[in-house]
Amino acid sequence: MSVTPRWSRKKPHFPLLAVLFLVFISCSILYNEFRIQQIHESPDHGSASGTQRTSFTFVKPNLPNGASEVLDRFRSCNSTKSYSGRKIRWADPDSESSRRRSTRQESCDVFSGKWVFDNQSYPLYQESDCPYMSDQLACHKHGRSDLQYQYWRWQPHNCNLKRWNVYEMWEKLRGKRLMFVGDSLNRGQWISMVCLLQSVIPADKKSMTPNAQLTIFRAEEYNATVEFLWAPLLVESNSDDPVNHRLAERIIRPDSVLKHSSQWEHADILIFNSYLWWRQGPVKLLWSSEKNGACEELDGLGAMELAMGAWADWVASKVIPLKKRVFFVTMSPTHFWSQEWEPGSEGNCYNQMRPITTEGYWGSGSDLPTMRMVDKVLSGLGSKVSVINITQLSEYRKDGHPSIYRKFWETLNPQQLANPASYSDCIHWCLPGVPDVWNELIFHLL
Ligand SMILES: *[C@@H]1O[C@H](CO)[C@@H](O)[C@H](O)[C@H]1NC(C)=O
Ligand SMILES: *[C@@H]1O[C@H](CO)[C@@H](O)[C@H](O)[C@H]1NC(C)=O
Ligand SMILES: *[C@@H]1O[C@H](CO)[C@@H](O)[C@H](O)[C@H]1NC(C)=O
Ligand SMILES: *[C@@H]1O[C@H](CO)[C@@H](O)[C@H](O)[C@H]1NC(C)=O
């Protein structure tokens, strides 16, 4: 401790005993902080058996709380203090379901494999044939002329994926509601699913409700719907408006999914995602019990862990595996730094036309601590949830993003236009493209 001598110099008559005492105090503070961090990095959900964790307050999530005000985009924090350390304790998953998961585990890992060029069977539909295509994802329409990104098949190492069959998929969906819940990446996957499915339904037998928080594609003959619910942070938040969510601060209710679950609880098949919205800096927490609008502030990963806890509580207490299927889609990678796959280069996904072929390539956009946290939450839920682990396979697809070939809502200035990489979208995915394969994985596992 180099601090002590300087102190001693300033206060020469400071008693030695007091100095030792102070050193002891600061050491134990440091030790405790480290321990908190450790707990923070490897949360132990649901079980209170540990001895160190008694210092945290555990909150039971998803309690109906009629008194708490609606959290919408006009809401702001009355004040903000630092995080109190409150954690979510979700319903204990029964040990039986965990056991069933391990026996159900497939022998083949469909998420481990490689991309194979296949212009015979791909794309599975034409961009211009899908009336529900989004201008954010229609890359060919917006000027992309290299179309190779549409021609790749995912080939698992040790088995084959079930061949996509649109009629078989509709039979699986007959009389059911399939709902995607999440952010714009999940919305892209929903559009992909609608495009994959819609071609065999006559125009007068299908419909799409206008864009709202819940958007519904309906196919009459099958009495089935394919829906999308905008809930980028899973829990209730000030960003739940599907259009107006560019806000200065993110406020979440870390202990409640009730606002959203009331919309998703009657779906038969649920596909969740959440990731990138937690990567934009600290998040404000507005606990349900807080009556004066006072918020706490927490880093994105910590906040996501709380939200995943509230979500997991709903899954653990409400999902009966034989009646409802729940999928969680892992983080979708971004490709903003070409130096990561091509050392020395300075670009991003712009002008990338081929997948990465280095087995196991992993970019810095896919956060490993987040993956570990998600891993832990999902394994605690046993057979109640199936993981769609798209991260590694999508990591290879630096060629799959819209880059400049999409509609941009804001006007681009001349400097931007002179440097296309500066405004490239390396987050979302062109359609037809990578999300079609995510949906083939769902088809395979359904
Ligand atoms: C598929 O790709 C090969 C090689 O690039 C090319 O020769 C062939 O014409 C393509 N076939 C179709 C149907 O596009
Ligand atoms: C259509 O599906 C809903 C469930 O989504 C079900 O309640 C209803 O009975 C079905 N109707 C027919 C005619 O099968
Ligand atoms: C903000 O805090 C004050 C004092 O604690 C309280 O009177 C007021 O109602 C709070 N405002 C909101 C919106 O909760
Ligand atoms: C997803 O796959 C990666 C390897 O590609 C693995 O490290 C990670 O634990 C998996 N995540 C989940 C939630 O299964």
Image (cartoon, rainbow, N blue to C red):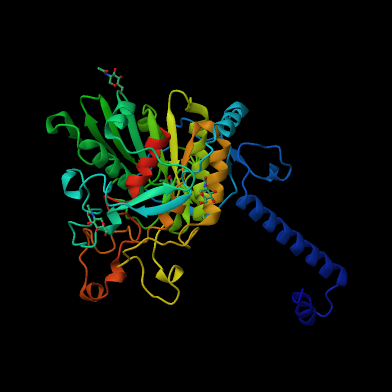
Query: Is the C terminus in the top left, top right, bottom left or bottom right quadrant?
Result: top left
Residue 130: give x, y in percent of width and height. Answer: 19, 44
**Left or right: 198, with 315 as reference point:** left
- Where 205 falls versus 160 (above or below)? above
Residue 51: give x, y in percent of width and height. Answer: 74, 42
Residue located 71% across and 41% down the image: 50
Report which quarter residue 60 is drawn in.
top right
> Which of 120/226 is in front?
120
Residue located 37% across and 32% down the image: 264
Would residue 326 be seen by someone viewing this image from the given angle? yes
Would residue 78 be seen by someone viewing this image from the given angle? no
**Left or right: 142, with 9 as reference point:** left
Query: Is the N terminus in the top left, top right, bottom left or bottom right quadrant?
Result: bottom right
Query: Residue placed farthest to the bottom in the image?
Result: 9
> Which of 386/161 is in front?
161
Q: Quadrant of ligand 2?
A: top left
> Which of 258/432 is in front?
432
Give the number of marks: 0
